[in-house]
Image (cartoon, helix red, strand yellow):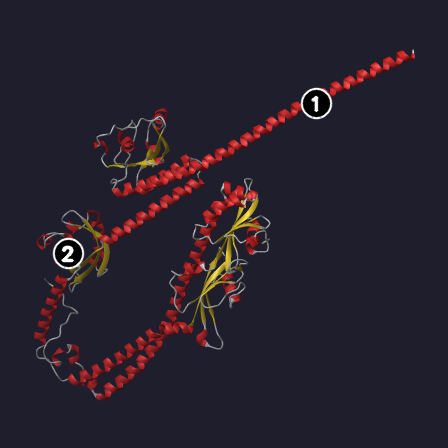
């Protein structure tokens, strides 16, 4: 095969003089004098010293900038981790502070009813020490229990003032606990409101500052970097170089840090007048949730120490370069008069050796290689034959378009355009190949071009590395991430939605998006054995061009039959990518959009099928991966419905209790009114009797006087 030998040389077996490159043989005689070589050596030495000093200064500046960039990434990561941690704690506390039973227990200050909630909350790894205080700051319950703190007034604490200010969640400054090990801690506190929205208490989580060690542990940090985290008061929350055993330990350069934060600067240089190498390079990132900042500082001495090995290597390389050049000059002088009469023979020998070497490397490579001509013909090695499943003769008769996946032909052609036009000499892309057995593999492909003297492509050298396994793992990881996000969205919707239908609608939206479907529905089996939908996707509703009355009739109280009915009757998921050919197909109602693919999965509760989730019209069709995803959503949806039904049952019980209380109050009022009426009757009768008796006595007195 033709191979360009430009830049490829193989030493011959003859004298050293004949192996000299041609340009060195034409050097002028004065250049090879001893005095000239010594002068060149001294000049080169001083030039290399200057280059070393210049490169060292530039490298230190680059190292400083890189340190700034690395520290900025690290502190932003730490800031984000702390913020996410505290937000997670806050959301967890709020999720309990909104619960009806929890609110009632706080309102009544009932430790017995509150204790189960606290024990359940303690299972969360983010929770350390829980407590509840009333709206005046009196702590009346905590977990773990410390009796000495019960009944104490903590209104002077920062966490109480922070929450009480606007009755909003708040993360406190550092303080020292008064119970237990009396360690340093911060409090993440949220207000608790009653049914009328009035504050009735404060729920807080007091966690030891040691949790920051766990947060920072996975963050890559330089051994020379000094890391400090301060709260809104400037107190040290964490430090890897300052001892802080008591609350009130402040960061040494706090005024400068505060000024930098106020000016929104993320980098700061602090000079040391006494010691130039003690100059500090400080990176700052604010942590808004705790009102503080993450600070990473390095000294110029630290940077120099980290780069000392590199600078030493640079000095050694330059010194070795100096020695090599000096030795080369003396070598050239020593061999200057020697001429090679066999230069042409050696050139031919080098060419043959180069071709043999290239062929050996090409054939013995473990990576798939090919040489492709501009007209598309290819020549391949054994590794590529094994990779694609073709014989060498078969591949040599094919063009690259024949083994490229149809969807990637345009991508490959576009990648080759710069090579054809001369805009580039190499390119790289990830594409798919078709194996002889019909399988598809993913490959990381690198392509380089060899050109003739006019710049036209002679051939393309292609290296192909099989990355199919890695690609499959990446796709599996992405699917798992989407699956977990969909389940999280369903449970979030369960907390926020007011009805079971709203939860179902949210679940259906996740199912349609996760499977790439056009539309779908969720339905349940009614007690009479008929089927009714509880959620219908918007695209499905719009595509169903059915009259209003007919549409309602077909959505509610349907007989279980057809493709979707088999999902319930068989109690298992069903994938149909050719619905018209399915034996159980009963057709579609007039106006319904064409059904090109279908996927359904049953909803099961304690082993009993209670409904199903179905999606349709995913192109090019559904796979086992889609089935597994939909079955996982079914499990999550059933659990979500259980929780929603339990919540609705509690709400109905509360409403019924309130109605009974109102009815009993009305009955008591009616009876009280009746008693007042009877009392008025008896009192009136008594007054009339007294009046009558008085008149009788008056008449009898008058008769006696007569």
Question: Where the N terminus falls, by quadrant?
Answer: bottom left
* Residue 372 seen: no
Locate residue 639, reporting x and y percent: 38, 40
Residue 188 visible within the image: yes
The part of the image, by quadrant, that contains residue 604 is: top left
Return the residue at label 1: 679
Q: What quarter of the picture does the C terminus occupy?
A: top right
Q: Does residue 598 sit above or below 192 in this rendering?
A: above
Classify mark 2: helix, strand or loop: helix
Give the tally of numbered discs.
Answer: 2
Q: Position of residue 314 (x, y in %)?
A: 31, 75
Q: Residue at x 65, y 23 (%)?
A: 674
* Label annotation for residue 584: none
Residue at image point 34% right, 39% down: 634
Residue 32: x %, y % from top left: 20, 85
Q: Residues within 10 Å of mark 2 (few under 14, many from 20)?
A: many
Of 48 and 610, the residue lying toward us: 610
The structure residue drawn at horizontal position 72% and vertical position 20%, both measured from the top left corner, is 682
Tag nearer the camera, 1 or 2: 1
| Chain-order first, disc 1 or disc 2 | 2
Marks 1 and 2: CB-CB under 8 Å? Answer: no
Q: Secondary structure at mark 1?
A: helix
Q: CA distance from mark 1 to mark 2?
A: 110 Å
Vertical placement of 296 versus 99: above or below?
A: below
In this rendering, position of residue 586 left or right of residue 241: left
Q: Which residue is mark 2?
A: 384
Quarter of the image holding residue 577? top left
The residue sitting at the right extreme is 706
């Amino acid at each position: 095969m033709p191979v360009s030998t430009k830049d490829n040389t193989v030493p011959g077996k003859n004298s050293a003089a004949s192996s000299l490159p041609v340009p060195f043989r034409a050097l002028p005689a004065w250049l090879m004098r001893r005095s000239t070589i010594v002068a060149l050596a001294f000049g080169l030495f001083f030039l290399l010293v200057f280059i070393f000093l210049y490169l060292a200064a530039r490298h230190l500046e680059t190292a400083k900038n890189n340190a700034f960039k690395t520290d900025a990434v690290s502190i932003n990561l730490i800031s984000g981790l702390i913020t996410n941690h505290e937000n997670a704690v806050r959301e967890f506390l709020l999720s309990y502070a909104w619960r009806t039973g929890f609110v009632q227990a706080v309102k009544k200050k009932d430790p017995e009813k509150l204790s189960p909630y606290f024990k359940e909350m303690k299972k969360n790894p983010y929770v350390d020490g829980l407590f509840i205080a009333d709206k005046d700051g009196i702590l009346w319950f905590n977990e773990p229990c410390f009796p000495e703190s019960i009944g104490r007034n903590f209104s002077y604490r920062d966490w109480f003032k922070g929450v009480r200010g606007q009755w909003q969640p708040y993360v406190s400054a550092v303080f020292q606990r008064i119970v237990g090990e009396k360690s340093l801690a911060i409090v993440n506190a949220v207000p608790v409101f009653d049914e009328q929205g009035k504050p009735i208490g404060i729920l807080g989580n007091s966690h030891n500052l040691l949790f920051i060690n766990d947060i920072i542990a996975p963050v890559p940090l330089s051994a020379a970097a000094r890391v400090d985290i301060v709260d809104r008061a400037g107190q040290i929350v964490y430090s890897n170089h300052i001892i802080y055993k008591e609350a009130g330990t402040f960061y040494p350069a706090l005024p400068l840090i505060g000024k930098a934060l106020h000016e929104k600067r993320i980098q700061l240089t602090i000079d040391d007048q006494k010691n130039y190498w003690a100059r500090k390079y400080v990176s700052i990132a604010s942590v808004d949730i705790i009102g503080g900042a993450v600070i990473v500082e390095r000294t110029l001495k630290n940077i120099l120490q980290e780069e000392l090995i590199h600078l030493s290597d640079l000095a050694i390389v330059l010194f070795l370069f100096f020695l090599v050049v000096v030795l080369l000059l003396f070598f050239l002088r020593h061999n200057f008069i020697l001429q090679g009469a066999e230069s042409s023979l050696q050139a031919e020998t080098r060419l043959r050796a180069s071709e043999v070497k290239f062929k050996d490397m090409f054939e013995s490579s473990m990576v798939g290689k090919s040489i492709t001509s501009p007209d598309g013909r290819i020549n391949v090695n054994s590794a590529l034959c094994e990779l694609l499943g073709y014989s060498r003769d078969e591949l040599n008769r094919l063009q690259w378009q024949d083994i490229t996946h149809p969807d990637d032909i345009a991508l490959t052609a576009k990648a080759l355009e710069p090579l054809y036009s001369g805009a580039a000499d190499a390119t790289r892309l990830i594409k798919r190949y078709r194996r002889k057995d019909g399988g598809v593999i993913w490959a990381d492909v690198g392509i380089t071009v060899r050109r003739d003297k006019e710049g036209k492509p002679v051939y393309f050298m292609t290296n192909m590395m099989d990355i199919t396994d890695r690609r499959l793992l990446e796709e599996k990881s992405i699917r798992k991430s989407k699956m977990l996000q969909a389940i999280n969205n369903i449970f979030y919707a369960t907390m926020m939605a007011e009805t079971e239908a709203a939860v179902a609608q949210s679940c259906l939206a996740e199912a349609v998006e996760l499977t790439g479907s056009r539309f779908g529905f969720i339905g349940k089996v009614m007690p009479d054995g008929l089927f009714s939908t509880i959620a219908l996707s918007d695209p499905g509703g719009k595509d169903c061009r059915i009259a209003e009355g007919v549409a309602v009739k077909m959505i509610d109280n349907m007989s279980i039959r057809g493709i979707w009915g088999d999902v319930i009757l068989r109690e298992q998921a069903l994938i149909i990518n050719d619905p018209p050919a399915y034996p159980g197909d009963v057709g579609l109602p007039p106006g319904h959009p064409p059904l090109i693919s279908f996927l359904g999965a049953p909803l099961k509760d304690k082993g009993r099928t209670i409904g199903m989730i179905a999606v349709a019209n995913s192109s090019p069709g559904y796979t086992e991966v889609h089935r597994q995803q939909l079955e996982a959503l079914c499990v999550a949806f059933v659990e979500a419905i259980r929780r929603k039904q339990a919540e609705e049952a509690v709400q109905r019980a509360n409403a019924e209790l309130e109605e009974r209380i109102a009815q009993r109050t009305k009955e008591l009022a009616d009876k009280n009114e009746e008693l007042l009426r009877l009392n008025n009757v008896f009192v009136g009768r008594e007054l009339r009797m007294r009046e009558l008796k008085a008149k009788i006595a008056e008449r009898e007195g008058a008769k006696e006087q007569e």
